[in-house]
Image (tube, grey):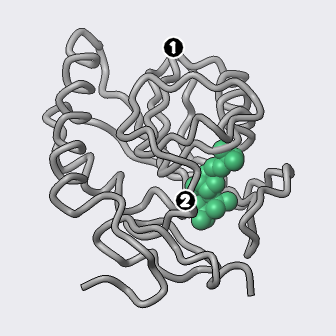
Amino acid sequence: MLHDDLKSVLLTEEEIRTRVAELAAMMDSACAAAEQPPLMIGVLKGSFMFIADLIRALKTECAVDFMAVSSYGAKSETSGQVRILKDIGENIEGRDVIVIEDILDSGITLRYILDLLNARRPKSVKLCALLDKPARRKVPVEAQFIGFSIPDEFVVGYGLDYAEKYRGLPYIGVLKPSVYME
Ligand code: PRP
């Protein structure tokens, strides 16, 4: 049933499950020739549900690590300031890395993370974002794997929050403007 704070469902559980399986198959193909398992880096908090489902759908053996960053706080607009709250524990020099994100919006967070990781001399860095809002891009970021290109609406659920709410919804919905305009 639709949460009272949402005006519509953008992506159902079924649509997400189908697309996650497709993304996993694309990654399996991309990783087929690799000599060592890629390192999947989930960017917390928003990606936790996506990376859990993605890795279960993947046939490729992979290592997993997490980074925690924040640029939004409790606001709906990015502050433009990326804060690293937790860095990865793995040494990525010479390794194939895939960064897993829930949403690519202005691109400021991902640009920062990709530059940071590339400076550590990995063999390759790819980006997988479940959602992409191309209309909001402020800095260029190239993602090799995109789940869904979506319109510029405030989406929550499946890991995505507004002020730490709605992360546990199994689908992705559009928040009523009255909820964040108050
Ligand atoms: C979200 C999302 C990305 C970032 C994308 O994180 O997970 O990291 O915003 O936005 P950008 O392209 O405009 O930089 P958020 O700061 O909301 O933190 P959270 O994942 O902990 O909810």
Give the residue type at disc 1.
Answer: Lys
Percent position (x, y) of residue 143?
A: 50, 26
Image quarter for residue 136? top right
In front here: 57 or 136? 136
Percent position (x, y) of residue 97?
A: 47, 28
- Where disc 2 sits, the SS reads strand
Q: Is residue 68 visible?
A: no
Percent position (x, y) of residue 150?
A: 46, 45
* Relative height, residue 43 to residue 142 (above, below): below
Q: Earlier in the sequence, mark 2 or mark 1?
A: 2
Quadrant placement of the C terminus: bottom right
Ligand 1 has an atom within 8 Å of the beta carbon of the residue at disc 1: no
* Relative height, residue 177 to residue 70 (above, below): below
* Relative height, residue 116 to residue 158 (above, below): above
Which residue is tagged 2?
44
- Where disc 1 sits, the SS reads loop
Judge the density around disc 2: few (<14), some (14-19), many (≥20) Cα neighbours within 10 Å.
many
Q: Which residue lies most toward the top here?
A: 33
Which residue is tagged 1?
123
Identified at 64% across, 26% down, the residue is 141
Ligand 1 has an atom within 8 Å of the beta carbon of the residue at disc 2: yes
80 relative position to 150: left or right: right
